[in-house]
Image: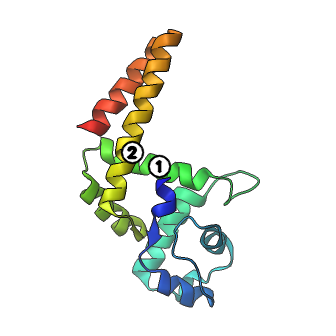
Amino acid sequence: MIASRARFHYIKKLQRAAGYRLPDGAFHPANMEMIAGSMDIDSLDPGTRDQILHFYKDFLECNCRDSPLCGCAERKFIVVVLDLREAGLNPKEIHSQLLDDYGIDLFPADILNFLEDSVHLLEAVRSVADLAGQKELAERSDEHIRQIAR
């Protein structure tokens, strides 16, 4: 999954703020729990603090009992990447946007692979929807395929 490849560009700053070593994966459980709970955000520089707050607001806020380890953060991240692509950004531009907004570093090649996999999955959904007579779902799948593949 693409969320497992996402890395915090500023992990050293987060480690200093937390006071202990952290994995660099943005959606690693230790990082999500630290951001959602015990981190001293005020010790971060303003730019990093804004990125962490943006990360928290966009990915970690949910009402699940197991939050932040419920899986919502990863699903929300996938939606953000797909929305950026459907807005017309190419993988390199998506990389830059994620880095600017959240401090998340993700290789453009990983983004491209994810988008290709998404198109294949949507093609399968469309085929099953056609077989099941779900015309609306098939049409929505086609639209998303066109938006991602352009």
Q: Amino acid at mark 1?
A: Ile
Q: For this view, does 96 lie left or right of residue 79?
A: left
The answer, for residue 134, to whether it is visible in the render is no
- x, y (%) of residue 98? 37, 62
In the rendering, which numbered label is found on residue 82? 2
Whole-percent x, y for residue 92 in the image: 25, 59
In the image, 50 versus 30, the foreground residue is 30
Residue drawn at 45 percent across, 13 percent down: 130
SS label for mark 2? helix
Question: Which residue: 68% across, 59% down?
Answer: 69
Q: Please provide percent x and percent y for residue 47.
A: 40, 79
Residue at the image point whose x is 70% and y is 51% from the top:
63
The residue that label 1 is drawn on is 78
> Dot 1 surroundings within 10 Å: few (below 14), some, or many (20 or more)?
some
Q: Residues within 10 Å of mark 2 (few under 14, many from 20)?
A: many
Q: Residue at x 29, y 44 (%)?
A: 87
- Residue 147, located in which quarter of the rendered image? top left
Specify the farthest residue to the right: 65
Amino acid carrying mark 2 in the image? Leu
Residue 104 or 24: which is nearer the viewer?
24
Residue 138: x %, y % from top left? 42, 19
Q: Secondary structure at mark 1?
A: helix
Contact flag, marks 2 and 1 (Cβ < 8 Å): yes
Query: Does residue 31 appear to the left or right of 101 in the view shown?
Result: right
Seen in the picture, residue 10 relative to 55 is either above or below; the reply is below
For the C terminus, the image quarter is top left
Colour scheme of the picture: rainbow
Q: Is residue 39 visible?
A: yes
Q: Is residue 117 above or below residue 69?
A: above
The numbered disc on residue 64 is none
